[in-house]
Image (tube, rainbow, N blue to C red):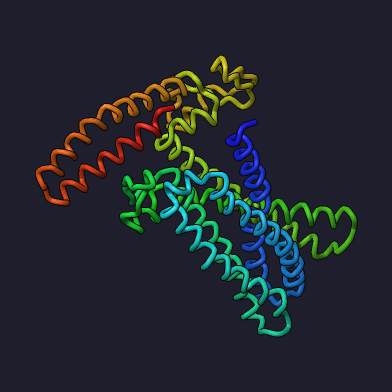
Amino acid sequence: MDLLTLSRIQFGMTAFYHFLFVPLTLGLAFIIAILKTIYLKKRDKRYDNLAMFLMKLFAINFAVGVATGLTMEFEFGTNWFTYSKFVGDIFGAPLAIEGLMAFFLESTFIGLFLFGKDRISEKMHTFAAWMVAVGSTLSALWILIANSWMQTPAGYKIVETPQGMKAVLTDFWEAVINHTTIFRFLHCVDAGYIVGGFFVMGIMSFYLLKNRHSEIAKLGLKFSLIFTAIVSFLQIIFGDIHGYQVTHGQPLKMAMMEGKWETEKGASLDLFGIVDQEKQETKVILKIPYLLSILSYHDPHAEFKGIKELVREYQKIAEDARKKIPVLEAELRKLQSQGAPQEEIEKIESQLALAKANAKAYDI
């Protein structure tokens, strides 16, 4: 087993384990804040007791999420050092902001909520709950800003340095307010709310079956049912918009997720299938006709490009970029020998760096 495969296995396991806990804490934090707000208004002690109980579960899952998240951040440097060297100046910034701003905000108010009970006013205690929810959401936002830039980069240029090719930030706000960030964020955070809602339903159902703390369990089950129904409906909307975005912005990613090797008109959504990479085909077991074209293009008869066609298109981009490289190098030498203005030289250098990057990136 080579180094690349081992790196993928380790990082995949870390990310998988980490993401078992992150959506849960996202959802629980918001649910706890709502429960505390209801208690503040109604002064019904059941809501306060339920919020305190759920915060203990939140704290346990938060601790495990932090441990796996820190490990994963280190693995960006150890497992994917070439990637980190190439985009680290941009990709690292939102990760650092997430840690310095959102994580510390969340951690501070978790302590205040857990240990400040009966030591601070109920308004302040409720405020602490909302700050935990805000901190969790901001953590998700900055991580998804980094992820969105990685998926659909903006506000940058590629330069060639003595250490190799490198992405350099040119516009912070363009990179942060990426055109795919908002719906990626809403899709992910709402998924966390759904996970939190089902988690609370499961816990409350367990207590009802065991006939323990039945009064609070009934209240928690009713609340979580209503909450989960609302956020689940919203996910239909967010998921549809995000799927549409991925199809248009990253068609190869969508084709590979769906195991579509050949281009299809009126493409079916293949629910179950076996992918054979050597033969480049997917043996479909169960499919829904036209549904993939509907989800991807909102048109049942739309053409859905397959992996093979998209690979050919990307290879053509790589070939065109390779042809540009000697032309741009010659032009750069000419400008340098003629003592051309620095702006013209930098413009050609930027085009040359981009051509070299595309020649490598699209050669798949």
Q: In this orientation, which residue lies closer to the viewer: 165 or 254?
A: 165
In the image, farthest residue toward the top: 279
Image coordinates for residue 303, horizontal then vertical, percent: 41, 23
Above/below status of 118 relative to 232 = below
State left or right for residue 318 relative to residue 7: left
State left or right for residue 71 relative to residue 337: right
Q: For the point 51% across and 23% down, which residue is it?
A: 260
* Among the 4 quarters of the image, the one containing residue 172: bottom left
Q: For the point 63% across and 41% down, which residue is it?
A: 12
Task: Give the quadrant of the C terminus.
Answer: top left
Image coordinates for residue 54, horizontal then vertical, percent: 73, 64
Q: For the point 79% across and 57% down, which residue is it?
A: 204
Above/below status of 110 relative to 192 = below
State left or right for residue 151 relative to residue 313: right
* Among the 4 quarters of the image, the one containing residue 36: bottom right
Q: In this orientation, which residue lies closer to the viewer: 147 or 121?
A: 147
Task: Mark yes or no: residue 311 visible.
Answer: yes
State left or right for residue 178 relative to residue 350: right
Above/below status of 139 relative to 291 = below
Task: Mark yes or no: residue 234 visible.
Answer: no
Number of dots carrying numbers: 0
Task: Give the quadrant of the N terminus.
Answer: top right
Image coordinates for residue 248, horizontal then vertical, percent: 40, 35
Q: For the point 58% across and 62% down, which residue is it?
A: 136
Q: In this orientation, which residue lies closer to the viewer: 235 or 347?
A: 347
In the image, farthest residue toward the left: 338
Image coordinates for residue 200, horizontal then vertical, percent: 73, 56
